[in-house]
Image (cartoon, grey):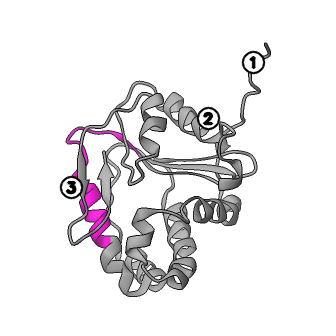
């Protein structure tokens, strides 16, 4: 039996921004967080790509931005001890991207950070695969590539989708907590 063809994973560059944003926007179309932050479907469709553009452009070294050659799979990682605070300019850009939904987005961000482990860790902030590529191994390959680069350092992520739990557990993650975003927000697993 032939072994599977390895999937090339590379560092994303600024030239990948539009394809990364498109992939992540499609990957998160049915997402409990964005459904709660943007309850209006039209507002969600307008705002989510802008949010991912800000996440991508703001996630530069010392973190990692990994993609497949066609950007059908994407991961954004934050290095240990990387400050999560955003400056005034970034806050203004986020306000312009989200409008009043920024308050719900801020509530999610604060809840996420409140559940971070106390020790330094690599943070898998975003992992997404274009839905047309689900089941092809791209998600596993791109997360594993990040884990391989990190080595034995602690890694943390959270998910709001129960169907993701088995996937992450198969990569060596284990659930260390469950919690809800205050004010009726989505449920998360850390």
| Helix, strand or loop at mark 2 | helix
Check residue 115 for magenta coloring. yes
Q: Residue under circle 3?
A: 114
Q: Quarter holding the C terminus?
A: top left
Tag 3 or tag 1, which sits nearer the N-term? 1
Q: Are marks 3 and 2 in contact (CB under 8 Å)?
A: no
Q: Are marks 1 and 3 in contact (CB under 8 Å)?
A: no
Q: Residue under circle 1?
A: 3
Q: Residue under circle 2?
A: 141
Residue 79: image location, x then y, percent? 40, 44
Report the magenta residues as a range: 106-123
The answer to whether 153 is drawn above or below residue 185 in the figure is above
The residue most toward the front is 163
Tag 2 or tag 3, which sits nearer the N-term? 3
Whole-angstrom CA distance, mark 3 to mark 2, is 29 Å
Residue 132: image location, x then y, percent? 71, 53
Whether residue 182 sits left or right of residue 165 in the image: it is left
Which residue occupies 46% across, 44% down? 164
Whole-angstrom CA distance, mark 1 to mark 2, is 14 Å
Residue 51: image location, x then y, percent? 50, 71
Which residue occupies 65% across, 36% down? 137
| Helix, strand or loop at mark 1 | loop
Who is closer to the viewer here, 190 or 96? 190
């Amino acid at each position: 039996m032939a072994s599977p063809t390895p999937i090339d994973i590379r560092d994303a560059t600024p030239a990948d921004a539009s394809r990364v944003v498109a992939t992540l926007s499609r990957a998160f179309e049915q997402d409990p967080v964005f459904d709660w932050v943007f309850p209006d479907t039209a507002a969600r469709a307008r705002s989510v790509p802008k949010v991912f553009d800000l996440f991508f452009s703001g996630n530069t070294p010392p973190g990692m931005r990994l993609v497949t050659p066609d950007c059908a799979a994407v991961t954004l990682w934050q290095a240990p001890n990387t400050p999560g605070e955003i400056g005034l300019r970034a806050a203004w850009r986020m306000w312009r991207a989200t409008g009043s939904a920024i308050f719900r987005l801020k509530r999610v961000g604060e809840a996420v950070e409140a559940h971070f482990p106390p020790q330094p860790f690599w943070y898998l902030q975003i992992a997404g695969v274009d839905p047309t590529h689900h089941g092809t191994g791209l998600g596993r390959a791109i997360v594993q590539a990040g884990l391989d680069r990190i080595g034995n350092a602690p890694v943390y992520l959270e998910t709001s989708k129960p169907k993701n739990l088995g996937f992450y557990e198969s990569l060596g993650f284990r659930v260390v907590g469950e919690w809800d975003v205050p004010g009726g927000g989505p449920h998360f697993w850390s």
